[in-house]
Image (cartoon, grey):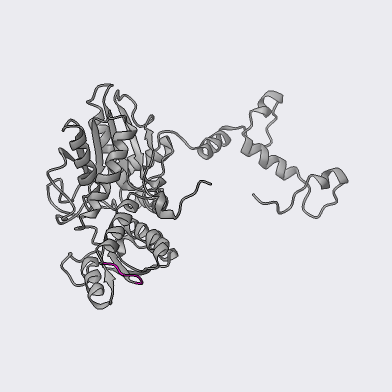
Amino acid sequence: MRYAQSVADLVGNTPLVRLTRVTDGIAATVLAKVEYFSPGGSAKDRIARRIIDAAERDGLLEPGGTIIEPTSGNTGVGLALVAVQRGYRMIFVVPDKFAGPKVDVLRAYGAEVVVTDTSVPPEDPRSYYSVSDRLVREIPGAFKPNQFANPNGPLSHYETTGPEIWRDTDGRVTHFVAGIGTGGTITGTGRYLHEVSGGTVRVIGADPEGSIYSGGPLHGYLVEGVGEDFWPDSYDPAVPDEIHRVSDAETFEMTRRLAREEGLLVGGSSGMAVVAALRTARELPADDVVVVLLPDHGRGYLNRFYDDDWMRDHGFEVSRAEPTLVERARNERDEAPARGAHLGPEASAQVPVVERARNERDETPARGAHLGPEASGSTHEGAPA
């Protein structure tokens, strides 16, 4: 029989998918490493498993202990799917900026969630960093993975993500692009690819405008899971060869395009990374291979940048490459002859499906009217959709 011993055994070995629609006019091959195929739905599964394994080995996490971590959601999910298998209590400290569906997911795994004020600086006692530190001091047997400083974070990507990319491209990768959050992904993966290629692979970071990594003034931004206002120990600034600053507007437009044009429903940090990848790829020859890492799924963001009203409320333009099926049907309906106009056989055949269905419905006997056996047999009240 073929099966996994636990869900944690399914972490990693995520696929590469070629981008073909958003890359119009680009000669180089652009491949997306789609991390939402991991069981927790993000790249954070990798660091979670590696950090917990190391903590158990080093005696930092005892049986029945408590895992406490400040997280915007994905790291918490990764930790949770490992922790529930091993019997640990989980407490996650989440900034209110990220409260909502992500918190619901953490609670679904059985975690306790503490929501904190986003507006305060990291050193403030109310910040999610400070609150998590206080809880670790107060709760016996508590362990803080500390993804911002734990060397096992970058090491997990050095040991898995980098080798997977090199293996799956047959060593042909020439550029690696990733967003920078804690810095673990780009540090570990980039370091491995630099070493294995003898320095020929170019490592490129993507950073939101307003974050510390790309320089410039610090200010707020809306994309989640990337950027910082301090320098995490998990980030090695010597690894990236260059860093691209990407605006929220560019990020959200590309993220929406990835769903509508490539069928990839991903988070905003993925859209940001693809913006940087395409900037790079436009200047490259056909033989080059760009791999861009897409960190997480987009289901947790449906009420944010995937929502047209949210986009408009935050001052972003809403554009689509082409109308949806519903919009095309509506446009056809609006252009059709008014109801009651005489239609010949050819014109009648061109009436939109939505309009014809409505006409047929209007001509159907009202509920409760007598139906003959044939008509009655064709009626399916309450059938599941």
The residues colored magenta run 60-64
Q: How far from the left and from the top, in percent, is residue 207?
A: 21, 45
Give the quarter of the image for residue 338. top right
Q: Nearer the viewer, residue 286 or 26?
A: 286
In the foreground, 333 or 197:
197
- Residue 319 locus on image (x, y percent): 37, 39
Image-based side of 318 in relation to 166, left or right: right
Check the image and report above or below for 201 versus 3.
Answer: above
- Is 373 on the left-hand or right-hand side of 45? right
Q: Position of residue 380 (x, y in %)?
A: 75, 49
| Residue at the image position 67 percent from the left and 28 percent from the top | 349
Position above or below: 174 against 55: above
Residue 216: say if magenta.
no
Q: Is residue 269 left or right of residue 214?
A: right
Q: Name the residue: 33% across, 71% down.
A: 65
Q: Is residue 291 visible?
A: yes
The majority secondary structure of the magenta stretch comes to loop
- Give above or below for 139 relative to 309: below
Task: Name which quarter of the figure residue 77 lies in.
Answer: bottom left
Q: Is residue 248 visible?
A: no
The spot of residue 379 in percent (x, y) is: 77, 47
Q: Nearer the viewer, residue 274 or 210?
A: 274
Q: Nearer the viewer, residue 312 or 198?
A: 198
Q: Residue furthest right?
A: 373
